[in-house]
Image: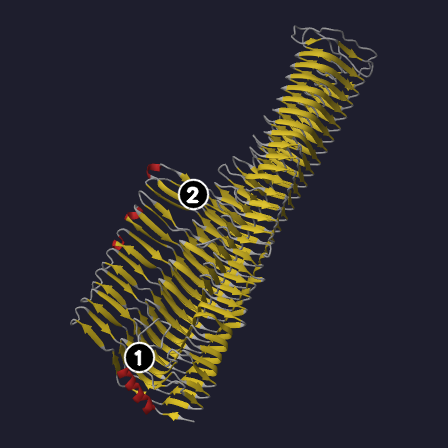
Amino acid sequence: MVRINKTVVATACAAACALTAWPVQAQENMLHGLGWVMEGNPGSSIRSSAITVSGNRSAAKVEAVGLGGSLGFGLAGVLRLIATAQVNTIGLEAMDVGQSQLLVSGNRLSGPMTTLGGAASANSILISGQGERKRLQGSQVTVAGNEAGDVHAQGAELYALLGSASLQIPGRASANSVLLQSTDVENSEISNTQQRAQGVRSVGGSALANVLTASQSGLQQVRIQQHGNVASEVLASGASAALGYGALAQAKLEGAALANSIALAQTQLGHSLLHQQGNEARQIVGAGGGAMANSMALTQMDGQVRNWHAVQQGNVAQRVGAFGGEGSVLMGALASVDNHASALANSINLDRTRLAGRNEHTQTGNDAQDVQARGGVALANSIWALQAQLDASSLTQQDNSAQQVRTNGGSVSALGGALGAAERSSRAGANSVVLADQAALKNMQVLQQGNQARGLDVRGGQAMANSVLADQQASLQDGQVLIEHNQAQGLSTQGSQEQLAGGLLWKAQQDAVVLANSLAVVGSQWRSPQLALQANTAGQLHADGGSITANSVSLERGDGAGSALHAPVWLKGNTAIEVQTQAESSSTAISSSHTRARAALNAVLLHDNSSVDADSQLQIAGNRAELVSGMGGTALVQSLAAYRGASLVRTPVTIENNRAQGIHARGDHQQTLGYGSSRHGIAAVNSVYLEGQQGAGLKDSHMQVQANRAEEMHADGALVQANTLALSQRGRLLESQALVRNNQAASVSAFAQTTRGLFGVNERQSFADVNLNTLDIQAPLAASSLLVEDNRVERVDAQEGGASVNSVALGQRAQGLRALEMRVAGNQATGVRSSQGQQALAHSVTIDGTASNSRLDVVGNQAQQVHADAAGAEASSVKADGGSSVAHSSIGITGNRASIGTGGTVASVKNQQGGRIAQSRITIANNQASASQGGVNASVINSGSLGNAAITISGNRGSANAALANSVRNRHGRLGGQIAILNNRGQAAAGGVLNSVDNSGSLSGSVTIVGNQGQASGNALANSVHNSGAMNGRIVLAANKANASSAGVANAVKNQGQLSGRVSIVGNDGTASTSGTVNSVVNNGMMAADVSIVGNRGSASMGGVSNSVVNNGVMAGRVLIAGNQSSTAGGTVNSLINHGVMTGSVNIVANRGAAAPGATTGSVINAGALVGAAGVAANVSHVANPGYTYTVPSTGVINQSVLIAPAYNFVFQ
């Protein structure tokens, strides 16, 4: 073995400094310009040897200054030459090394070491092939236990014409490092352990402390260890070049500071282990360049990396910063621009590198504190891949900790900002993976587990914690991503903006972004067999004019095309607490602007033409969110949100067992002199939210929102949606299923906002709407099924806004609803209130579009204390708005129960003015409810067109106080078809209508009212038909029971318009008192119909009418009153009373009646001249007081004949 002592080293070093001057090339070429200890001739080698530099102490000042020359006494130009300074260093050049040991250990440099215009090296090993690849085999290279302080290197300059132009040339300072160039290392070990370096600085170049670098080399089956190193105060700053002493132009060159790091460039790497453990780095700064602490960087290693394993374990980095520098024209008076900077702590950077084979990257137990970048990138415990390709690799990040990671955007300006100014983005990352600039991962396994990040702060840029970002056309194929058990706390972001003259001429704004425990895909492709985010926690997050994404998956457009996701996604067991977003805005007398605010928590977000295909299954389950506030922006909580053309194809989506509490959404309104703008806040909780002007779509997808809970939510001039599927006007829902089941929502409130300009002009009012457990679809549907089932809502208050709970809303662009199956079943709502003319909707369906060949069922719902003022409340109902159309469909409303407030609608179908329902079947059965003060219960109301319809109302129980119950009302509309009102029960008062048909429009067809029971009082209507419009068809009233009092009408037909056809009143039972009417026909209009009143039982008293016909208008047709049984006390029974004009025949046959004083029974009474003949034969009377007949002048006319046949009739004469 050959040993070379330190004396030889020192002598060679001195000679090299005097004789050698190497040109400086690219930054990766870190070894050019060095003077070497040993320079070999061709064929020189070292075998089975040991070269040792150990135990040295250097306290003196070491200085090297480059040589120089000039032209024309420096008037024409000055040329800088390179100098080198080396202490305790081994240098090998153009030599092969085999089975040898290179050792630099136990050395200490305490005095300042400086070089101007060159390189300074201390306690290092430098190996170069000098342009020819040399080999280092079976050897051990060790730099251990050294200390170095105050190592400085500064680049020099080239001047021309008294400095009218200058060019900066970089320098380098290195301590306790191994530098390789053009060297192939095989079957060897490189150790860099237990080092101490302090005060390593480079101006216009690089500062290296405890570092391994390799350029244009090879590392095969090499073990590299960096253990227990400490580096502090490592600074690299860029120098500058100037034109006219900077008065005309100047530009900055980058500097780099590396501590406890590995940097490889244009180097082959295979079957090797790179291990960094227990290193500490403090105050590492790259100003106008980059800083690395306890990190690895692989640059331009295309196709040359295979089967390597990188391990970073237990490293500590504190106060790591990168600050972009500046360049300017006319000292910044015309223009200036910043340069990016980068700061890496405990991180791996892969730049233009291609990895093949099986590669592993492991980061565990690392700690980073106070990492910041201004105008650049700051990463802690992270992996950063740019234009890199990774195949069959794994990325593992476990139990890492990062605190106080910050970024601040740089700037560019013109005329000192007088003409314009803008900001440049920054990026800060902790425990994260960043793929950018077409980086590609294939067969990659990514695991982020048990990491912690606290105190990330972004001003005009992006902050990431425990996240994966694919940006700028990056891609992942056939890889798995698992993000679990991570914690992110105290993350904040603030958007920024610059403007000129208050925004009068020009203005720019910039959003800020926070990612926590998330995957973000921006303008990239992501294909994976599994993507899971589970058991992560994010808290104390704040976005001011920016966005927050926590425990979420986000797909954004980026600069190119939209992103695509081809992966099953699971978001399970994540928690987000104390999250706040706020949209920033500014306005002047002439202009105003807004920056966006968005929070996505435990959510999946698709934006700008992003897509999810059949390979994907989205599941958001078991997550929790508390104390979330969004002002003037969007809060997406445990939801799937798709914007602006995003789409899902054959994608199952499940949102279940999530919990949300304390959600607050608020609108943002700005005005000056009566002008400005307003922005609504939106909160989507446990929901599927598809929005945007370009629309979003679902095709052949199955969507479930089930078993979720949302409590204590508030909207202030905003929209709150919880446990809901919402699809905007320009969206699509084709061949899909949507299920909202077993969800709960409670304690929800909403208030509208009103803003006024100067002197009260230009008033603007926002909405405050609440949608809970609802399907809100404003888009076309085809061959889809919708289900809202077993949901519960309590305590909802929408002040000046609308509330929709457990319902389905199909909006104005929902054209072409074809082959649709919809079911709203088993839901409960208690205490739902809206005001100021807005609706409260519970368990209901609204249609504002066209539907055909569809089925709509509202079954088994319960509602209590549902109130709305002017617009009324609706529960368990179906409404077709104006302009809508329903054809060849069936509507079923069965088994519902409700008690709602004034003017409400329960278990009913409404066809509004301009609406159209045709060739459809409507069934309202077995409902129980009450309606008052204009309310509607278990009924059909038509104000539009309802044709060729089959309407059945049966088995309902309810009351109508000045309201409508178990009935059909045609209000100024057109109605045709068959109406059957069967076996209903209820009470009607104060003008109420029960078990009846009330027509004030045009009605044709048949009306059957059978087997109903009711009470009508106070001018009410029960089991009857009331016509004040035009009506044609057959009317049958049979087997009904009712009581009518106080001008009430029961089991009767009352015409005040035009009525033609046939009227049969058969087998009814009723009583009439105090001017009440039962089992009768009362005509006050024009009537051309045959009337049969047969087999009824009734009683009349105090002016009541029973089993009779009363004509006060014009009546034509045959009248048969037969087989009725009645009793009267001061009323009229089994009779015809004419006060108008009547033609036809009247037959009163086989009736039984009992007369009392002031009563009329079995009679024909004409209040005027009687034209024709009346006869009485075989009378059997039951009278208490005989009556008499008298004649007075009359306009009434009875022609043809009046026949009173033998039976049990009694006629007063």
- CA–CA distance in space, label 2 to label 1: 67 Å
Residue 120, disc: 1
The answer to whether residue 495 is left or right of residue 719 is left
Which quadrant of the structure image shows residue 850? Answer: top right
The residue that appears at 32% across and 61% down in the rendered structure is 338
Rendered location of residue 471, percent (x, y):
46, 59
Q: Do the residues labelled 2 and 1 touch (CB within 8 Å)?
A: no
Seen in the image, is 963 located left or right of residue 1126? left
Sequence-first disc among 2 and 1: 1
| Mark 2: amino acid | Gln
Look at the numbered disc 1 and give the secondary structure of its residue.
Answer: strand
| Disc 1: CA contacts within 10 A as few (<14), some (14-19) or many (>=20) | many
Number of labels in the image equals 2
Is residue 1 at all visible to an observer of this figure?
A: yes
**Label 2: how many Cα within 10 Å (few below 14, some 14–19, many 20+):** some
Residue 913: which quarter of the image?
A: top right
Residue lying at the far right of the rendered structure? 1178
Q: Can residue 1047 be seen in this view?
A: no
Q: In which quarter of the image is the C terminus?
A: top right
Work out whether residue 816 or residue 1124 is closer to the camera in this orientation and state it: 816
Judge left or right: residue 666 versus residue 971: left
User: Foreground: 36 or 440?
Assistant: 36
Location of the N terminus by quadrant is bottom left
Q: Which of marks 2 and 1 is in front?
A: 1
Per the image, the residue denoted by label 2 is: 753
Residue 163 appears at what percent x and percent y?
20, 66
Q: From this view, report whether residue 752 is shown above or below residue 109.
A: above
